[in-house]
C-alpha cells in the first residue's frame, strides 16, 4: 500500500510522521473521508471545498492548490490500483515545538491514504440499524465549530464508546441545549408526514457531503425538505429515519432509545433514497 506523504508516494511502513507534528500532539489539523466508486471519486470538488473551509476556520494556510491536492488524491488511488475504496485526506499543522503556539509550524503536512473500507454489514441496510442517544453532548460551536472537520474527534469518540458499551454501533448526540445535532460519524434525517427534516449545521451538525446529496435526491424525488430544531421526541415519533455519511452512505434506522421507528422496519421512502444514491455515486464524480 502506497501512502502520499510530503509530496511523494512511500510504502505504508515507511510513511511516518514526526512526534513533534502538532496533528499528533494536539489534534491540530483537518481531514476528509472520500469514496472511490468504480474509478470515480465521489464529490471530490465538494470535499476539497470543505477541506479549504476547515483550513480557513482554523487559520491553516494550505500551501497546495485545489488542483494539486486533487491530482495527489488521484495519483494515490492509481498507485494502489484502486477502483473502489475510501480515501483519507489529512492535513496537519506540521512539525513544531512543544507548546500550543503555531508560530514554529511552518510546513503543513499532506497525507493521503487510499484503502478499502469496512461498511456496516449488509444486514443493516436490509433490516435497519438500532441506535440510542448517549450522554456526551456535541461540542458547543463557540468552543469548536462542529462544521470544522478537525483532527480532534474526541467528542465523537466518547459518544461512540458510550454507544458501544451499551451494544450499539451508532448514537445520537444532542447539542448543549438538548436538541438533536447528529450521530457520532453521520448526519441524521427524519421523515414525518412525507416531509424530510434534518438539523441545521447551527444545531451542531457537520455539513455532510452525503447530507447535501440526500437533500438533492429529495428535490429530484419531489419530497419537500427543511432544516429544523429537532428534539428526541421528534425522532421517536418519526415515520422513518435514516443516517447519511461517506462510509455509511444511507442507512435506515429502525429503533431509537428502545422505541421502534415507524413500523420498526426500514421505510419505503428511505429505500428510494438509498436506491437513488447508489445510482448516483458512479456518475457524480471525478474520474481517475
Ligand atoms: N457528522 C460527522 C461527525 C462525521 O464525522 C461525518 C463524516 N463521517 C458526517 C457527519 C457525514 O459527513 P459526510 O457525508 O461528508 O461523510
Image: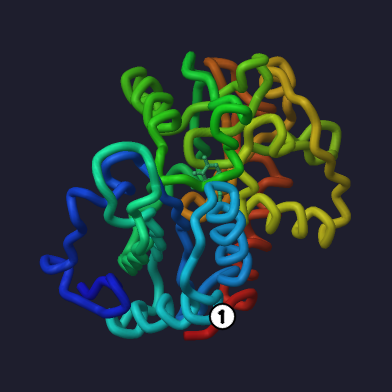
The picture places residue 105, in percent across and down from the top left corner, at: 35, 55
Q: Residue at x 53, y 15 (%)?
A: 258
Q: Is residue 272 left or right of residue 175?
A: right
Above or below — where is 231 with respect to 241? above
Q: Determine whether 254 is above or below 84 in the image.
A: above
Q: Nearer the viewer, residue 127 or 193?
A: 193
Is there any visible trace of residue 255 in the rendered image?
Answer: no
Residue 153 placement (x, y as % from top left): 41, 37
Q: Nearer the viewer, residue 193 or 197?
A: 197
Identify the residue shown where x is 60% and y is 69%.
Answer: 43
Between residue 144 and residue 172, name the one nearer to us.
144
Is residue 239 visible in the rendered structure shown here? Answer: yes
| Quarter occupied by residue 81 | bottom left
Is 38 placed left or right of 190 in the picture? left
- Where is residue 77, by image quadrant? bottom left
Instruction: Label 1: state its secondary structure.
Output: strand
Q: Is mark 1 within 8 Å of ligand 1?
A: no
Which residue is at a point 54% across and 26% down the rendered structure image? 139
Q: Position of residue 284 (x, y in %)?
A: 64, 74
Residue at image mark 1? 286
Number of disc labels: 1
Position of residue 270 measured from the top left corner of the image (x, y, whole percent): 67, 46
Amino acid at each position: 500500500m502506497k501512502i502520499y506523504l510530503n509530496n511523494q508516494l512511500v510504502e505504508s511502513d515507511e510513511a511516518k510522521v514526526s512526534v513533534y507534528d502538532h496533528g499528533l500532539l494536539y489534534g491540530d489539523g483537518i481531514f476528509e473521508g472520500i469514496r472511490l466508486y468504480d474509478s470515480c471519486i465521489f464529490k471530490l470538488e465538494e470535499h476539497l471545498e470543505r477541506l479549504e473551509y476547515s483550513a480557513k476556520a482554523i487559520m491553516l494556510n494550505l500551501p497546495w492548490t485545489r488542483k494539486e491536492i486533487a491530482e495527489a488524491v488521484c495519483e494515490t488511488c492509481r498507485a494502489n490500483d484502486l477502483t473502489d475504496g475510501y480515501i483519507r485526506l489529512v492535513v496537519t499543522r506540521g512539525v513544531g515545538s512543544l507548546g500550543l503556539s503555531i508560530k514554529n509550524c511552518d510546513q503543513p503536512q499532506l497525507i493521503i491514504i487510499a484503502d478499502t473500507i469496512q461498511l456496516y454489514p449488509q444486514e443493516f441496510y436490509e433490516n435497519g440499524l438500532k441506535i440510542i442517544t448517549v450522554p456526551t453532548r456535541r461540542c458547543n460551536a463557540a468552543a469548536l465549530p462542529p462544521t470544522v472537520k478537525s483532527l480532534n474527534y474526541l467528542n465523537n469518540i466518547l459518544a461512540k464508546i458510550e454507544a458501544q458499551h451499551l451494544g450499539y454501533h451508532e448514537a445520537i448526540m444532542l447539542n448543549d441545549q438538548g436538541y438533536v445535532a447528529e450521530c457520532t460519524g453521520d448526519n441524521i434525517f427524519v421523515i414525518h408526514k412525507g416531509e424530510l427534516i434534518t438539523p441545521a449545521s447551527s444545531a451542531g451538525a457537520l455539513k455532510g457531503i452525503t447530507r447535501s446529496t440526500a437533500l438533492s435526491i429529495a428535490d429530484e424525488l419531489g419530497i419537500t425538505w427543511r432544516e429544523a430544531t429537532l428534539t428526541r421526541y421528534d425522532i421517536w415519533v418519526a415515520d422513518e429515519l435514516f443516517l447519511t455519511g461517506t462510509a455509511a452512505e444511507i442507512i435506515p434506522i429502525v429503533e431509537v432509545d428502545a422505541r421502534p421507528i415507524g413500523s420498526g422496519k426500514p421505510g419505503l421512502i428511505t429505500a428510494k433514497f438509498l436506491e437513488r444514491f447508489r445510482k448516483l455515486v458512479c456518475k457524480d464524480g471525478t474520474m481517475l
